[in-house]
Amino acid sequence: MPLALDNQDMLGSYRSKVLRVKLGITTLWTAREVISVKKIITHVKYIEWNNDNDIALLLLFKPIKLSMLKTPICLPPVGNFSIKDWTTCFVIGWSTTGEIRHPEVLQKVEMELVEWKRCKKQIWSLTKNMLCAGYEEGGRNACMGDSGGPLVCKTLKNYFWYQVGIVSWGIGCTERGVPAAYALVSNYVNWIETETAKAGKPYVRKAQLRNKDKM
């Protein structure tokens, strides 16, 4: 049922009150740290029928204390995205697998990025805010339970890990010749900067670049 903007705000407020973020875990039912969510920031131009602008931010009640199991990941640069700039990509999540319906251990699988024009021929509702990954022969990809999870890659230049995509949707899970669609994070870095600044917890791209230079 379509919701008016005020009702959507109330629904988001309710969800934030019951949502919890578990940190530093690789086993599903073990949580070293749990933080409540203060606010869910959704993209105002999200389109439900094709999942365009399928991205949201979580504002937590307190900062995350970083450790060996809790480290930040880089965001990709703003601008034209080319799959030729990236290597060694993985999708990570808790999804159903062929052998285990609900795995307790965090799963990962190496992925191949797919050229946008080629993917568009297979997924007609694909937009420029989406990225595709998968294998022509099928058999490996994100599935139910992975939604909202990261697609991470390294670059050919510095080998840092970047989150290039967010698991969004697909036709089946591992269908032959049909890659899965991911939200293209590079299209939203400016949006992330704007929304985090509004929330009083700004993500600053230049600070990320400075931190990388120190590493």
Image (spheres, rainbow, N blue to C red):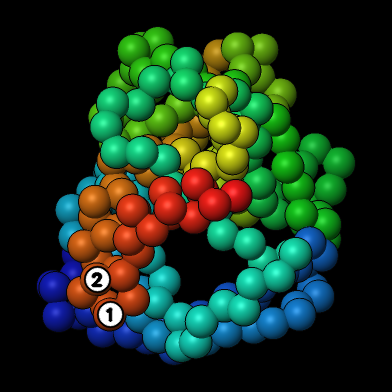
Instruction: Give x and y (percent) for residue 83.
Output: 46, 20
Instruction: State the mark number for residue 200.
Output: 1
Q: Residue at x 70, y 30 (%)?
A: 110
C-beta proximity under 8 Å, tags 2 and 1: yes
Where does label 2 land, which residue? 197
Instruction: State the mark number for residue 19.
Output: none
Identity, as a three-letter code, of the amino acid under mark 2: Ala
Other residues around mark 2 within 10 Å, as few (<14) / some (14–19) / many (≥20): few
Residue 148, above or below 20 = above
Q: Residue at x 64, y 72 (%)?
A: 66
Residue 207, above or below 127 = below
Q: Residue at x 73, y 42 (%)?
A: 108
Q: Secondary structure at mark 1?
A: loop
Q: Residue furthest right?
A: 99
**Quadrant assignment, res 21:** bottom right
* Number of numbered discs visible in the structure rendering: 2
